[in-house]
Image: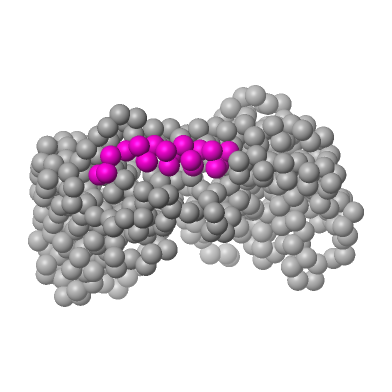
Amino acid sequence: MSAAKNPTEKVMSELELSWLDASENAAHTRLFIWRVPAGGESLLDAFIALQQHPEGRTLPDLFLGLNTPFETGYGYSEALGREFVEQYEATENAAAWNAEPWLPCYSPAQLHTLLQSFAQAFAEDLRYLVLVLKPSGVSDESALTRWLQGWLEQGADAARVLLIDTLEQPIWQPLYEAHPRVVQLIVDEVDGMRVMHQTAQQQTDPDADRLLFRRYLADAMLLLEKGSSAQVAARGELALGIAQRRGWADQQAMMHNLIAGGWLKGGDHAQAVTHYRQAQHLSGEIPDPALKGQLRTQSTFGEAGAWFAKKDHLQAAKGYRQAALEAQAIPHPVFEIEGWRMSGFCLWLAGHRPTAMEEYARAVQAAESVPLPERSQTTLPLVFQDLLRIHDKRRTEALEACAARWQREKQRLIQQAEAALPAEPTIAQVKQTESRLQLQLEAMFTVIREERENLIRRGDESFRRVIRLAREKLHPHWNGLPEIAHPFDAPPGEWQTLPEWGNHDASLSDTAGSNPL
């Protein structure tokens, strides 16, 4: 007799049945949308990954997940076709199939022909060939939608597309509503938190306290997502009782942070602060310095966030300042930067302008220990954007508007380029279109970058000083957020040259100023 399935295996079986039910009568379906709660998306990803391996495959269909970034429709088609063939050729003991006659693919129609050729070659081994598309980046959502609409115009053969979204963010709902005849929606209520909870309930441990603690912790985490603040606190207190009796300081601190999160979610700031402070106190009893610093910093950030949510900006500033100091002691420069930044932000909101500037300066100083190429991944760019807004709000908003205009113009040029191509373009046609698009995008990039430079040039000295400092600490062509990257990631060249006004020493010593645009 086979062993009982664990909670994860049960969910995999549920998803398998769900797909079989949905795909059984899908003769006209060209695209599936699989919708799950946000907390269950990782389970669906795991199910699809399992189906991609010969040992784990339980369905008559072959799934292939691709996170190819989307720039243009023709570029996306070409990349998908190329990656599909590369993955096939990398498969051990792959049977003979010649993809060359169908490459390159520059349209959904050409990609469909390639995939259908594969499906027909292996018709005895599969029912559907399902491309699971999760682009790692999308230049233009409307362009991706146009590509998907082009796919829907193809025949409903063995090649299908699968998109994934969530109940909380059903981003593909408009596509489903526009094409209900050829798009099928699958909805499953799988829940990663519940699976974790069920797994904890089934665990065994010779230490009864440790086992019971894990179960109470799993209960509290599930209630944090689905229950009330009082329910989280009640279950959390049961776990705390065990941790206190056993002297587990780290587990006590963690539970206080969890209970505090429950109270904060329910809007009880006072209770949240109380538990965050208890977590801070208990973290001092942890012997491991690294864990002690991590939990203390986490709970201090939590308390500061509770004060910020209550709009008590002075208390929040104190909390963020303390969190920065604790992060400094670990050391953890990324957390330290954020602590000083939020302290400065809160002080500015509270009207303490000179002190706020000092805190921002400390954030810049904290970034010195972060390698230069990694600083853009911290909140240091937000520090400089805050400072620009402090010095000249209208000018900073104008810089932001330039970035929005760049996105609009890029989308317009991409749409124009795609519209100029026939349904099944040749290599020569695509090369000509791509060359023209590159020239247009680079020209537009230069125009908008110069608009930003002119805005900066006409700002007062304090505004330009912030830009100079940002270029020193981030990269030499930084000109505000959102950043406008070169459309083709061109290497450093003429477009990165500093303007004349930017060749002076950088500091934050001057007071904020403003002048007309």
Residue 241 can be seen, yes or no: no
Residue shown at 22% from the left, 52% from the top: 508
Q: Is residue 425 left or right of residue 60?
A: right
- Give coordinates of residue 464: x percent, y percent: 31, 45
User: Is residue 112 magenta-colored?
Assistant: no
Q: Which residue is nearer to you in this view: 359 or 182?
A: 359
Q: Main secondary structure of the magenta part?
A: helix
Residue shown at 86% from the left, 51% from the top: 102
Q: Is residue 94 left or right of residue 198?
A: right
Residue shown at 12% from the left, 63% from the top: 282
Residue 40 can be seen, yes or no: yes
Identify whether 184 is placed above or below 119.
above
Q: Which residues are magenta?
A: 444-462
- Give coordinates of residue 259: x percent, y percent: 20, 49
- Give coordinates of residue 296: x percent, y percent: 17, 61
User: Is residue 451 magenta-colored?
Assistant: yes
- Give coordinates of residue 25: x percent, y percent: 74, 35
Identify whether 412 is placed above or below 322.
above
